[in-house]
Each structure stands twice: as C-alpha cells, then as structure tokens.
Image: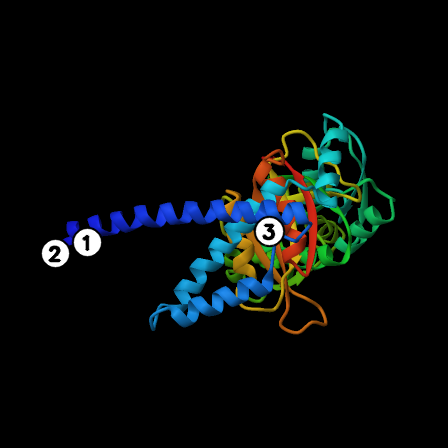
Amino acid sequence: MDLLDYRNELDGLDAELLQLFCRRMEIAAKIGAYKKEHGLPVQDPGRERQILLKIAEQSPEGLGDYAVSLYSLIFELSRASQNRMMGENSPLTARIERAIAETPALFPQSATVACQGVEGAYSQIACEKLFRLPNIFYFSSFEAVFSAVDKGLCRYGVIPVENSTAGSVNAVYDLMMKYKFRIVRSVRLQVDHNLLVKPGTKLTEIREIYSHQQAISQCARFLQGLPGVKVVPCENTAVAAKLAAESDGSVAALSSRVCSKLYGLECLAASVQDRDNNSTRFICISKHLEIYPGADRTSLMMVLPHTPGSLYKVLVRFYALGLNLNKLESRPLPERNFEFMFYFDLDTPVYSPGFLQLMGEMETICEEFNYLGSYSEVI
C-alpha cells in the first residue's frame, strides 16, 4: 500500500466515526431530555469515571491515555449539548442579562476615578483616554485604588495589568483575588520612557535613576549601559519625575514627556525602552456590574480542583463553544501550597449564545469562579 491508500482508508474510518459520533450525540440529547423531565443533574461523575476506567482497560497498550483524553473531550461536548438543550439560566447568567439590559447605552464622559501615582502618571493618561472629563483622585498604591473603589470613594479605578515587554503586573493580579470588582472597559496605551533630568544636567553627573519597577524592566538594555548608576524603584513614573525635579541634579527619572513639561525637566535621552512597540494595557474597574454596548471581551478568574486534567476540561469547554482564548495567567494562592488561581481573557461578544451558556456552566466545574466582567477595549 502507498500513502494514498492509507489516506483513503483513514477517510473511510473518519466517515464511520462521524456517523457514530452523531449517533452518540443524539442519544446524549435523549438522556438530557430524560434528566430535564426528572430533575436530574447533567453531570454524573460516577458514571463518567466507570466509563473512562473501562476505556483505559480495554485500550491496547500505549493507547490508553489517548483514548481517555478522547472520551473526556466527548463527555465535555455531550454535557455542553445537554446544558444548551435544558436552557436553564444560572443566577450569574440572569445577572449578566440584566446588566446588558440596564446599563446605559453610552460609557460615562465624566466620573470620579481613582489612579495610582501623581499628576502625569501613565494611569492618568489612560484615564483621560477612557473619560473625557474625569475627576481624578490619586492614591499611593494599587491596593489603595482597589480600596477606594470598594468603599465607594470613587466610582471607577484605572490600573495597569500587563505590558507588552515586561509582562503582567503581578501585584495587580494578586489584588484581583482579594477585592470584588468588575471590569467595565480597558485601554491599551503606547508607553514611551524618557530619561528626564533637571535642566543643564549632564549624563556623567547622574548618580541615581528612579522609576517604577515595570518601567525599569522595560528599559533594561539602556540601563545596562550606565554602569555605576544606582537604579531605584519607586511607586510610579510620575513620582520618579517629581523626585528628580526636587533633587540636587544628580537624580534622573524614567518617565513620560508629559512629566517633563509638568515638572520642568529636560529630556536627556528619548524613547529608551527596549522595544519601540512598548504598550501597557489598563483596565477600568467598578464595584458594580456594568456591560456597555459593544462588549466583546470577557475576563474570568477561577480556582480549579487540584487534580489531573482540571484545566484541560475548562479549555475544552472554551473550544467546544467556539470561544477564543487570548490570555491565560496563573498566580499562586496565598496560604494554599501548590494551588493556583487562573485568569482568562476571552475574545467573544457578550451577546453570543455560547458565552451565556459558558457562564451558566462554569460554577459547576470550578472550586471557585469569579466573573470579572465583559467590556470593550479602546486602542
């Protein structure tokens, strides 16, 4: 036999497999109808365990794991089909549908907004891209921003979550686990770091450079070319510019051009970040669930059972419902050894039936599940 013969044989087997799969899904639908009529849950873990054990025992040597993986996927597809047929909304799905109906058609032009740092911070620039006339309150830390929103001192908060060069802002992901909030919009901001000094300062006179840790990471190559200069992390790039302006001239800052004008500084070296396409994504958080028209991105957090395949089952569910995953982040859970929180960004319209179905099912397969919100992103 040649390659074409083998492929023709596979085509014939695939046709048979497809027919058998469709037949299996039809029977699964009938079982779903029976469960709905008799008030039974969709998932029967004991039954699935028995089948997978039998599959593993009956499979030829070397194929058991593959067969179990295949049937695990088939079970996920069957459950998704049965859940869709039952059409019962979970409390979360009902809240989402209510938020879609009750949220105003336009994102607010003006609001009280919490930002970390001082005047000139990148958070302020991001805030002004989201709101036309924001009333900004500045706080010294990311946690203070979350707390201000949580206590109702500010309606919204704007915080960075990831950078295209330095990666995720881990401190923010840790705070996401602590506070209850919703994401209502996001914005991606081009970040341009400049070496700012007091007018007349020469490069050889600089002894210290201040900036935020993320900015320092983003300018690593430039900083390596300044041996003997001490690099000091601080709360914010705007705070760094303020410190440079108040110094004796031996202190510089990695900060924005906005800060050079704001604090009367001179740009000694422009655009010193490692990559020209350096951008930071900021999220706008609220204590209340608001879903504005055009929401096509959803963020989720979940804790999964500490068992083999638990993450796989979630990813399979995304795939089965045709939902595109564009970010997956994990963070260790405090005081829980070897357990993690998973953060997901899904690229899907909030109006998609598959999305609403997923929201109705996730709580049943997670130890903890938190829907962070559905929103659109400003570029």
Q: Is residue 243 left or right of residue 344?
A: right
How would you rate the neighbour count of disc 2 (Cα within 10 Å): few for under 14, some for 14-19, many for 20 or more?
few
Q: Separation of disc 3 and disc 2 at Cα?
A: 47 Å
**Residue marked by disc 3:** 344
Name the kind of residue labelled 2 in the image: Met
- SS class of the residue under badge 2? loop
Depth check, front residue: 262 or 327: 327
Q: Is residue 268 visible?
A: no
Tell me the quadrant of the picture where the C terminus can be found: top right
Depth check, front residue: 116 or 194: 116
Name the kind of residue labelled 1 in the image: Tyr
**Residue 315 spot, x, y in % from top left:** 53, 53
- Kindly check if marks 3 and 2 are in contact, taking CB atoms under 8 A apart as contact: no
Name the kind of residue labelled 3 in the image: Phe
Q: Residue at x 54, y 66 (%)?
A: 49
**Residue 375 circle label:** none
Q: Is residue 322 visible?
A: yes
**Residue 278 spot, x, y in % from top left:** 53, 46
- SS class of the residue under badge 1? helix
Q: Separation of disc 1 and disc 2 at Cα?
A: 7 Å
**Residue marked by disc 2:** 1
**Residue marked by disc 1:** 6
Depth check, front residue: 351 or 211: 351
